[in-house]
């Protein structure tokens, strides 16, 4: 893998998902670029700072209860980032350490990916991680956590109560679409070791790899799983289904490594921002682990960030077809800026572009073959909160280049094995799924159309007899 410019980059859907950091020697900047960047940071808005200090002093002096200076300052810093975009945020030292732990794939907690809601009164469950206490307890994507151990979310700093010693219990109060009132779920914490790569044979010669997130070891694990599948196939696979459904992202370098393993040449992804350090380009190096065997990438509305980087790289280079539904549409890059007190700031600094030069911010990647979710009723129905699940619906999101274009509809979440079967069919015979969809649509239309024979047998409508004028009474 060739990196045209080193940079500290982060691609992540949520603070609780994972972070992507790539470090290296700072690139040499031209004098003009350095002068321009220094000029941006040197223009301090003194009048605005004076206004901030006046408000700060007013709160300290007149608020009904005493306010700790450190807490007040942290609130001010969080507020500074809050209205920028959904992915810029402030981490205190504990949050930063937890963020780092999750990127490495091991921590003590319940195993759930969360998003802080703008009103700070709830945490939205993006998805429970496979085979974790949260998943086994029945927590669903779209659930809202409104209290932890009876304490409202608004009174809790960050999500630390969800973490704790393995074996201890935590009670979550949830609000769920379709449920008339909140309810409690007790979850037992454990050491979460997220397995980001799983594989199996679908049919003789046809392999399946599931990437649930992009962690530090995802690239190496992907290579191992491909090797094992090839051995089971007798040396070479006939094809591979790469499942990125509801993969919320993670380490950019891991996604780039997987793409590089499947590409012989070509660009993988590039990033562009206001300052030169945000610009980077990643290119593939010779060598395709699958030796040219066809690939189908399976996506849905939960495929975001680094997942979209991988799907876009493979499709734009003609290496894979994409099957599923429109992806989430997170096309921004975050940089983690460590502070001298151990805290960190995660700041959006650039947008990323697929090899074709397209930004997918707030639009996502539209599959070559679009799948629809199975209809579900009652308790099995997907939460209403996931019916329009995309970057474009997040408050304060960055405006996309093609956002608002005609025909845009958010993608669907595609659970279950049905999409895998469709992806396999498309892998074995490109175009078969679309042909099947057209046949099913034609059959459904024919069933709705009245049968001509039946229509002919219907009796003629009886015409109402004309009203007779009443006799005039003498």
Image: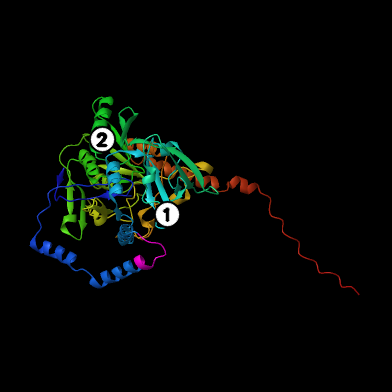
Real-space Cα distance between discs 1 and 2? Answer: 40 Å
Foreground: disc 1 or disc 2: 1
| Front residue (pair 411, 462) | 411
Question: How far across and how far down the image is residue 154, in percent?
Answer: 42, 54
Q: What are the residue bounds of the magenta stretch?
A: 59-67
Seen in the image, is 437 located left or right of residue 469?
Answer: left
| The quarter of the displayed image where residue 212 is located | top left
Mark 2, other Cα within 10 Å: few <14 / some 14–19 / many ≥20: many
Location of residue 146 with respect to 129 vertically, above or below: below
Residue 222, labelled with which disc? 2
What residue is drawn where x is 22% and y is 39%? Answer: 262
**Does 60 lie within the magenta span?**
yes
Q: What is the secondary structure assignment of the residue under circle 2?
A: helix
Residue occupying image coordinates x 40% and y 34%? 167
How many residues crowd mark 1 within 10 Å: few (<14), some (14–19), many (20+)? Answer: some
Q: Secondary structure at mark 1?
A: helix
Q: Is residue 434 above or below residue 84?
A: above
Task: Specify which label sits upstream in the sequence, 1 or 2.
Answer: 1
Q: From where the camera sits, is residue 466 visible? A: yes
Give the residue pinned by disc 1.
154
Residue 400 part of the magenta-drawn span? no
Q: Quadrant of the C terminus?
A: bottom right
Residue 402 appears anywhere in the view: no
Quarter of the picture containing the N terminus is top left
Q: Quadrant of residue 111?
A: top left
Residue positioned 36% across, 46% down in the render: 160
Closest to the observer, 296 or 223: 223
Q: Position of residue 216 (x, y in %)?
A: 24, 40
x, y percentage for residue 249? 30, 46
């Amino acid at each position: 893998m060739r990196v045209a410019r080193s940079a500290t980059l982060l691609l992540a859907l949520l603070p609780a998902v994972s972070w992507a950091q790539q470090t290296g020697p700072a690139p040499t900047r031209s004098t003009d670029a350095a002068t321009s960047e220094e000029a941006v940071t040197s223009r301090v808005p003194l009048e605005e700072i004076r206004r901030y200090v006046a408000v700060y002093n007013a709160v300290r002096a007149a608020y009904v209860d005493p306010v700790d200076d450190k807490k007040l300052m942290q609130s001010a810093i969080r507020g500074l980032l809050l209205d920028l975009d959904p992915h810029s945020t402030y981490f205190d030292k504990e949050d930063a350490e937890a963020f780092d732990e999750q990127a490495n794939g091991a921590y003590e907690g319940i195993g759930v990916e969360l998003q802080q809601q703008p009103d700070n009164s709830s945490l939205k469950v993006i998805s429970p991680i496979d085979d974790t206490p949260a998943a086994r307890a029945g927590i669903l994507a779209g659930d809202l956590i409104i209290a932890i151990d009876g304490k409202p979310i608004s009174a809790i700093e960050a999500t630390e109560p969800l973490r704790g010693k393995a074996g201890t219990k935590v009670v979550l109060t949830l609000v769920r679409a379709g449920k008339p009132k909140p309810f409690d779920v007790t979850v037992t914490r454990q050491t979460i070791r997220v397995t980001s790569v799983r594989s199996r044979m679908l049919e003789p010669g046809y392999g399946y790899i599931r990437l649930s997130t992009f962690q530090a070891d995802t690239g190496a694990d992907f290579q191992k799983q491909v090797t094992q599948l090839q051995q089971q196939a007798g040396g070479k696979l006939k094809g591979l289904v790469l499942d990125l459904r509801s993969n919320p992202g993670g380490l950019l370098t891991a996604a780039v490594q997987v793409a590089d393993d499947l590409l012989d040449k070509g660009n993988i992804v590039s990033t562009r921002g206001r300052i030169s350090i945000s610009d980077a380009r990643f290119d593939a190096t010779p060598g395709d682990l699958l030796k040219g065997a066809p690939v189908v990438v399976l996506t849905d509305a939960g495929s975001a960030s680094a997942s979209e980087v991988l799907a876009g790289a493979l499709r734009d280079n003609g290496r894979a077809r994409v099957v599923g539904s429109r992806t989430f549409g997170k096309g921004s890059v975050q940089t983690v800026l460590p502070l001298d007190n151990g805290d960190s700031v995660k700041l959006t600094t650039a947008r990323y572009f697929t090899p074709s030069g397209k930004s997918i911010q707030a639009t996502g990647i539209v599959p070559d073959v679009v799948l629809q979710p199975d209809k579900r009723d009652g308790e099995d129905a997907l939460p209403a909160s996931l019916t329009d699940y995309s970057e474009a619906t997040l408050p304060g999101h960055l405006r996309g280049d093609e956002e608002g274009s005609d025909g845009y509809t958010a993608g669907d979440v595609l659970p279950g094995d049905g999409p895998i079967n469709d992806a396999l069919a498309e892998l074995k015979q490109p175009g078969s799924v679309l042909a099947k969809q057209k046949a099913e649509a034609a059959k459904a239309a024919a069933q709705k159309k009245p049968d001509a024979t039946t229509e002919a047998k219907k009796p003629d409508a009886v015409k109402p007899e004309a009203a007779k004028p009443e006799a005039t009474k003498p």
